[in-house]
Amino acid sequence: EEDISLVDNRGVTVHQASSSGLDTGRDSEGAEGTRAFRKLLYAAFRTRATDLHIEPRIEGCVVRLRVDGSMITAVQFSKQIFKRLLGIVKILCQIETSQKNQVQDGHFSVSIKGRRVDYRVSLTPSVHGQKLVIRVLDSSNSPSRLHELGLNSWMYDKLRTIATRDAGLLLACGPTGSGKTTTLYSCLREIDVEQRNAITIEDPVEYYLEGCTQIPIDHGQGTTFHSVLRSVLRQDPDVIFVGEIRDIETATVALQASMTGHLVYTTVHAKDTIGSIFRLLDLGIEPPLVANSLNLVVAQRLVRLLCPNCRKAVTPTSAQTLRMGQSVGGLSKIYAQQACKRCLRTGFHGRRALFELLEITDSIRDMIMKGPTIKGIREKARQGLFTSLEEFGFGLVGEGVTTFDEIERVAGSE
């Protein structure tokens, strides 16, 4: 942790890696609080944690890290150190230090081993004090290019082709935290931004994309995806990334834009690719607009990967073999998790995405126009290249990189 320098939200370094404490805490408790905070950030950095939770208790606080999607208890601190931690974060974020009974948000950054890592902060009142959640925005932990996502070869070819077209709609779906934005960022990096004007609308902007104009939603000013999107259409865009479709107004403008010479990327919350079509229809979008604008839908989930240091081979049960069916063929062994120090005794180390791609073919367009059914669209999809999330996941089980139970948890049929 000696390589950490703290930088406030104005970009001013307030604590060099070699110094002993923040300017606001030169006493021993202040220095101890600063050391504790730096150690927490370093622990999050080393474990590739996505979130750091500092939770108040009667006697102090508990710190937990979200690593590979699971919560891991890291350490407990006294009430005095807890107060110091809150104070340090508020100073870095330039937010009111005396206010304890309201929601507060902010951001700061850190230089770790010469690498910049950004953090988004949320403070919320609770019975024993403010709970602090710090989201880690370390772009080096995310795939940066499409070929690094782990797509099947035909999926990569299809996604890259449609993601670099002149116009149309590319839709990504999945729950919060499933990697939708990472995938669409990777698609944006396939575009020649020297030759095309790419604009993103995000809530909030999490990672910097070189060559793109990135616009954050400012709730304080009352801006929305819909209002910013209308403004962006007057900025001569070629490619527009809309962070999320939440209402019929945003959806209508985005879909219309994709039909008037713009390439539009956006996301919705839906279970799978076919469900995304019905999500747009349920918002009240006219079927002809959905049918004629959509080019491709991508659904995804994140699954934990087995720790290669401690995984163990097991014989699949007859029920498991039956469930996996033709996805993997006749497997004589699969792998299960154990526990070791390297994986923090979780049995897993790292995550990767499961993918499902649905190209909107002419036959599927006709079906959307006439009144689609889930069964009907699935049958049309099966006539071409189509792999469900679950089938993609069972393929990973066959490769020995994750467990049967993990795929059932994340992508199992309901």
Image: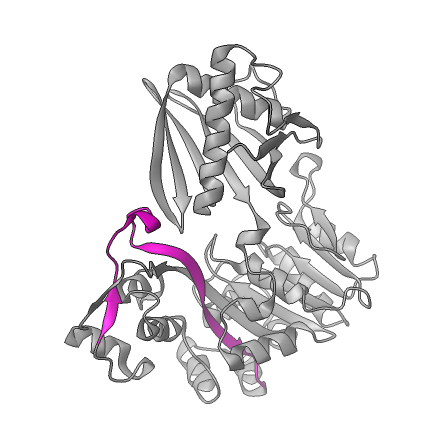
Q: In the visual, does 55 lie left or right of 365?
A: left
* 267, 76: nearer the viewer: 76
- Image coordinates of residue 229 in percent, x first then y, are 72, 54
Q: Which residue is situated farthest in the left direction here?
A: 318
Q: Which residue is situated farthest in the top direction here?
A: 27
Q: Which residue is situated farthest in the bottom direction here?
A: 383
For the magenta stretch, what is the residue range?
333-361
- Image coordinates of residue 254 in percent, x first then y, are 68, 62
Taking the image as drawn, is residue 131 in sight?
A: yes
- Image coordinates of residue 20 in percent, x first then y, are 56, 20
Q: In the visual, does 133 lie left or right of 162?
A: left
Q: Is residue 209 magenta?
A: no
* 346, 358: nearer the viewer: 346
The tally of labels here is 0
Protein image colouring: one colour
* 353, 374: nearer the viewer: 353
Residue at point 65% right, 29% down? 8
Residue at point 59% right, 51% down? 139
Residue at point 53% right, 27% down? 103
The quadrant of the rendering that contains the C terminus is bottom left
Q: Quadrant of residue 360?
A: bottom right
- Image coordinates of residue 92 in percent, x first then y, are 61, 26
Q: Quadrant of residue 348?
A: bottom left
Residue at point 31% right, 61% down? 406
Q: Is residue 305 above or below residue 125?
A: below
